[in-house]
Image (cartoon, rainbow, N blue to C red):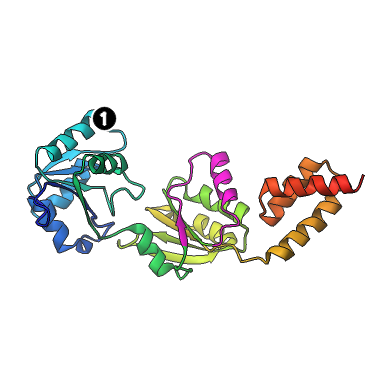
Amino acid sequence: MTDQQTGKAALYIVATPIGNLGDISHRAIEILRHADVIAAEDTRHSSRLTQHFGIATRLVSYHDYSSSGREDAILAELAAGRSVALISDAGTPLISDPGYSLVARARQMQITVIPVPGACALTTALCAAGLPTDRFVFEGFPPHKQGARRQLFESLAAEQRTVIFYESPHRIADSITDMRDVFGEQRLAVICRELTKTWETIHGDSLGALSQWIMADDNNRRGEFVVLIHGAPIVDQDSQLSEADRQLRILLEELPVKQAAALVAKLTGLKKNAVYKRALELAGASL
């Protein structure tokens, strides 16, 4: 199969359902049927999809742990004039799924890359969560280790856009607890679980209440998750700086500059370097 507009072989980035098989597009099915090769994250998983729709195209594996030789082989297929359809286990490839390196190299080789849009857990959750959708930031999966995870959350505590994460059933409880501790118990958030599937759940509340909800029932911790956090409230910058000065003056009476600045940065959400510089100014003025 070739791209009708250019007459060249193409790499097709094909979105597949995140749960409900009825969400696949007619165009996606046709491309998968007529491609020379389907590069799939897990061929065993994707074979269920292709069998369901009567797609006989050859499947090859391509995932995060594939050797460079596998990627080279796929690019060789494309360079030889054949078409390749890239799919992930669910949703849109490259969105917290493999494919970035393959697409980047294909474009460098001037191979046509054609997106075939469809299901994506990120946008599916966002449109139903009831949180602001005009501006948002997607952070993918948080780090597995608590220290790195909390550090990431702290860097986003003052983010005013809706913040979106993916999470696995093995870490959802720990992640929600850390979100509660860093973003605050009263921050609004929404947990989306098993989107488009039989047990689809979209549950919104404060992070304090959500941390209790997630532990109240084992079923609440099963499936694949999208977690959306309401952005931080917009704070008047002059008022925030004034409050930071007030807090610094109080703390500098009892604490070293570095410790006082770190505490105020954490309380206000201001950048640590800026607060530390201001603390040095106030400390110097008081000498």
| Residue 178: % across, % down | 57, 49
Point 85% across, 46% down: residue: 283
Point 62% across, 52% down: residue: 181
Point 26% across, 30% down: residue: 68
Give the magenta range: 136-160
> 108 or 216, which lies in front?
108
Classify 10 Å Cα crowding around label 1: few (below 14), some (14-19), many (20 and above). few
| Residue 138: % across, % down | 44, 54
Point 57% across, 45% down: residue: 150
**Label 1 sits on residue:** 68
Q: Is residue 69 above or below residue 169?
A: above
In the rendered image, the residue lying farthest to the bottom is: 130
| Residue 140: % across, % down | 42, 49
Q: Is residue 194 visible?
A: no
For the C terminus, the quadrant is top right
> 235 or 210, which lies in front?
235
> 224 or 252, which lies in front?
252
